[in-house]
Amino acid sequence: MNNMSYRDKMILLIIAVIVILAGGFFGLVRPNYTKMMQDKATFEATKVEWEGIDAKIQEIPVLKDSITTTYNEANKVAELFVNEAFDPVNQTFDDAKANYVLDQYIQPAVEENELKIVDFVPTGIATSEIDYYYYVPDVVTYSLLESADINGEYAEQVEELLKTDTMVQEMETAEVMTNNVQLSLTGKKENLMKFLAAIEEDENAILVRSVNIEDYSFGENKTQTITEQQTDEAGNVTTVTREVPAGTVGESKIDILLTFYNAMPIDEPVLGD
């Protein structure tokens, strides 16, 4: 080493420094650099994932508002079928008292309108599908008309007219709880009309399926035949038969078939804070 020239020593020193730097690079710097690049890739992937999650988090208030709005709108419709006459059934899920509570519900309406119950026959709890009621236009079409419709304007009009029918056919019907009640009453015509008006105005879902009136004139044309003896001035006795109004003028027997509909209230969605 002492015989080496200054030049050789410098070259050897430079080589040693290069070897040390290379060893440090490959031994320390390169692994750290590789790890840094891996961490950077992980960071970028996590950032993209977080941005997606954050975007969904930002949508939560909007979704909550949309769910709440949908619930409120649906609840308004559902409330039509939450029948307070079935409140004990809705509270206990036990239909054992269903007939009794219906009797208690209908009795005040009958009494307020001065009708008398002859018979009250409920059929008991059952389920029934609710069909959609809507108007379907009677669209006339024929081959020459279709051939003349080269611009498709008539076809578009027909499609628009039948849009409701097309949409409803694709919708599923819903099932609800029902109880049919056969009600036999006696009373006057004006009281019957008041009773039917009260049923119509009732906030609960009640359908009057049929009304059968035994005497549609309510006794106005009802007569009875009486026979009596009359004596003339000469003392002769004759038997006379004549028609007179019956004693129950103004009343008739009435049979009414009612259907009570019921559905459980919609649970309010728990959306959290």
Image (cartoon, grey):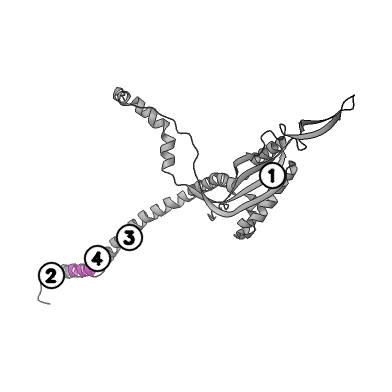
Q: Which of the 4 image quadrants contains residue 30?
A: bottom left
Q: Distance from label 4 to label 1 (Cα)?
A: 100 Å
Left or right of residue 132, residue 193 in this image:
right
x, y percent for residue 159: 38, 32
Between tags 4 and 2, which lies in front?
4
Residue wearing tag 1: 185
Q: Earlier in the sequence, mark 4 or mark 1?
A: 4
x, y percent for residue 23: 21, 70
Q: Distance from label 4 to label 2 (Cα)?
A: 34 Å
Q: Earlier in the sequence, mark 1 or mark 2?
A: 2
In front of the other: 256 or 156: 256
Can I make out residue 202 in this image? Answer: no
x, y percent for residue 215: 67, 37
Q: Residue at x 71, y 44 (%)?
A: 110
Q: Is residue 84 above or below residue 192?
A: below
Span highlighted in magenta in the image: 17-29
Can I make out residue 188 in this image? Answer: yes
Residue wearing tag 2: 6
